[in-house]
Every structure is written in structure tokens, then in C-alpha cells.
Image (spheres, grey):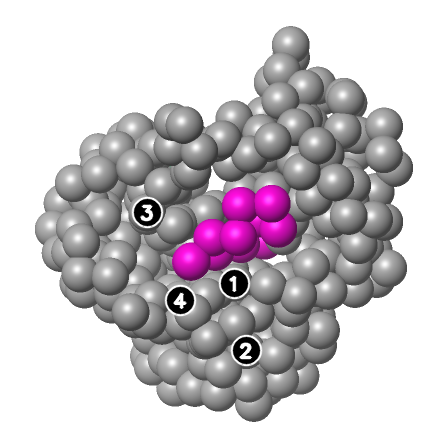
Amino acid sequence: MNTTLRIDQLRASVEGKEILKGLSLEVRGGEIHAVMGPNGTGKSTLASTLMGHPKYEVLGGSVTLNGEDLLEMDVDERGRAGLFLAMQYPSEITGVTNSDFMRSAINAGRGEGNEISLMKFIRLMEANMKTLEMNPEFMHRYLNEGFSGGEKKRNEILQMMMLQPKITILDEIDSGLDIDALRIVAQGVNSLRSADRGFLIITHYQRLLDYITPDFVHIMMQGRIVKSGGPELAQRLEAEGYEWVKEELGIEDETVGQDEDAFQMPMNTTGPKIR
Ligand code: ADP
Ligand code: MG
């Protein structure tokens, strides 16, 4: 069966604030969807909610992966079902080596009695690290500890390549990467492209999409998708920014869940008239 992630009218809150306000999106095998938007519009909240982060509470709507209710699954089950998230800020775990972590993750997916052999695992990890131009010593380093921003991002892509997920979500994988690293990361993603794998690429800037051509581009504002199109939409954002989208849709503040007292008046407005 072909892979389908179906998000329907998803609403979610964090710390009592509603952030996702009815978001619908369908990602099928073979498709790359880019979700773009200014900061504070709910992009990472979407990623965390899909992965089942405990801080994010689902208020309504549904998410299914190949017809199965994703929202009913715990985090591990979501991974086993074929969902993978490369995080915007990967955590560091002292005492667990990168290779131990990846081997457990692979074996969790394969199930008891079907574990990958150590030799096969090492060969696979070495081959993928070579593709990503990573120093072999990263195999034995504690997970993300002392990794630079760019090394963490590469390591997330390494996990993706090892796990071969059905649906991959990349949250700002391009932030903090120079052009060389960006090209290498894109190469990793492109190497996994296939008819039964789908990608949801969350990004603020268009530059990653120079290397990974999306099939669909969605703009997120105020916790929902406000506009969708093809790759040309990302190019227009690159050239003109987000202002025209706000004007076209009559949106003044594109962010969601900001505290009232943190709200700042635009510089060119005058205060209320006092008579
Ligand atoms: P984006 O990824 O588009 O920059 P986020 O989803 O990170 O947007 O954030 C959107 C809003 O959600 C933030 O302005 C904040 O109010 C709220 N938010 C997101 N994550 C958290 C969190 N872990 N704790 C508190 N508030 C959060
Ligand atoms: Mg974010």
C-alpha cells in the first residue's frame, strides 16, 4: 500500500495556548511538501504534535498514517509506524553513544528476534556517514554532545538514512548550515526519495529548496495553512518575502500564541487619541 499521512483540521495547544487552529494537509508516498512561514506561526508545533511530544495537547481534528489513528499511538509506536522527525533543536544525551542510539532505534523498528547483525549495522552506518561526509569518530561520541549545530543536523539526517522512514519531517534542518553542509544534507534526503516515502520539509527560507525540489509548497500563518502552490511559490517568497501574502489575505499579525503584553505596536502607528 502506498504511504499516506493525512492531517485533517488539526488543533493543538501548548501550555494552554491554542497554536494549531485547524490545519489540514495530506502527504503521500513519492511527494515532497514544503511548509514555509515566518517565525512564530506554529511550524515546530506542527512537527512536535505529529511526533506526540507530551507538551503538545491535541484539541481536535485527526491524523492518520495509512489509515491508522496516529494520535492514539505513543511516541515509540509512531516511530515504528514509519514516522521520523529531525528536530530543530536535537537533544544531547550523555552516556549513550551515537551508534548505540541508532542501533536501538533500528532494532525497535525490526522487533525482537529480528535484530540487525552488528557487522551489517556497522557497514550501513559507515556507508551513510561517508555519504554525509561525517568523521567516523562521530559513531562513538555521545549523542549530540559537543556537536556543532551543523554536526547535529547531519546526525539527524544520518538517523533518517539509517531508519528509512515512510514519512520524514524535517524541522528547519537548514538553519545553521553553510552551503556545503546544505548540499550534503539535501543529498541525503534525495537519496531516500522513492515512490513509497513522503517528506514534510519545514523551513523558513527557500535556499534548501534549491537542492530539494518540492512538489507542493504551503505557507503557514496563524497556526494554519493559508496558501498552497507549487515550487514557484517558494521562489516568489525568496524574491519578495512574506509581506505580499499577508496583504493578499488581509493578515496583520501572522504569529500565533504570542503573549498580549509581548505584543509590540508597529513603529509607524500612533497611539490612541485622547480627547
Ligand atoms: P515556528 O516554528 O513557526 O517558529 P512555533 O511552533 O515554535 O513556531 O511557535 C509558535 C508559538 O507557539 C510560539 O509563539 C509560542 O507561543 C508557542 N509555543 C511553541 N512551543 C512552545 C513551548 N514549548 N512552550 C511554550 N510555548 C510554545
Ligand atoms: Mg520552528
Image label count: 4
With 48 as the anchor, is 7 left or right in this view? left
Kind of residue indicated by mark 2: Pro
Please tell me how crowded label 3 is: few (under 14), some (14-19), or many (20+) other residues with Cα within 10 Å. some
What's drawn in magenta, residue-wise?
A: 160-172
Which label belongs to residue 81? 3
Q: CA distance from mark 1 to mark 2?
A: 9 Å
Q: Earlier in the sequence, mark 4 or mark 1?
A: 1
Placement of the N terminus among the 4 image quadrants: bottom left
Q: Earlier in the sequence, mark 3 or mark 1?
A: 3
Q: Earlier in the sequence, mark 3 or mark 2?
A: 3
- Label 4 CB-ligand 1 distance < 8 A: yes
Dividing the picture into quarters, in which one does residue 248 lie? bottom left
Tell me the residue that label 1 is attached to.
201
Percent coordinates x, y for residue 80 in the rendering: 36, 41
Q: CA distance from mark 2 to mark 4?
A: 16 Å
Which label belongs to residue 214? 2
- Which element is circle 4 on? strand
Tell me the residue that label 4 is attached to.
220
Foreground pick, 160 / 103: 103
Q: Earlier in the sequence, mark 2 or mark 4?
A: 2
Please give the name of the residue rendered at 11% of the width and 51% of the height, measured from the top-left corner. 60
Please give the name of the residue rendered at 39% of the width and 50% of the height, measured from the top-left corner. 82
Q: CA distance from mark 3 to mark 1?
A: 19 Å
Whether label 1 touches label 2, CB < 8 Å: yes
Kind of residue indicated by mark 1: Ile
Please tell me how crowded label 1 is: few (under 14), some (14-19), or many (20+) other residues with Cα within 10 Å. many
Percent coordinates x, y for residue 7 in the rendering: 24, 62
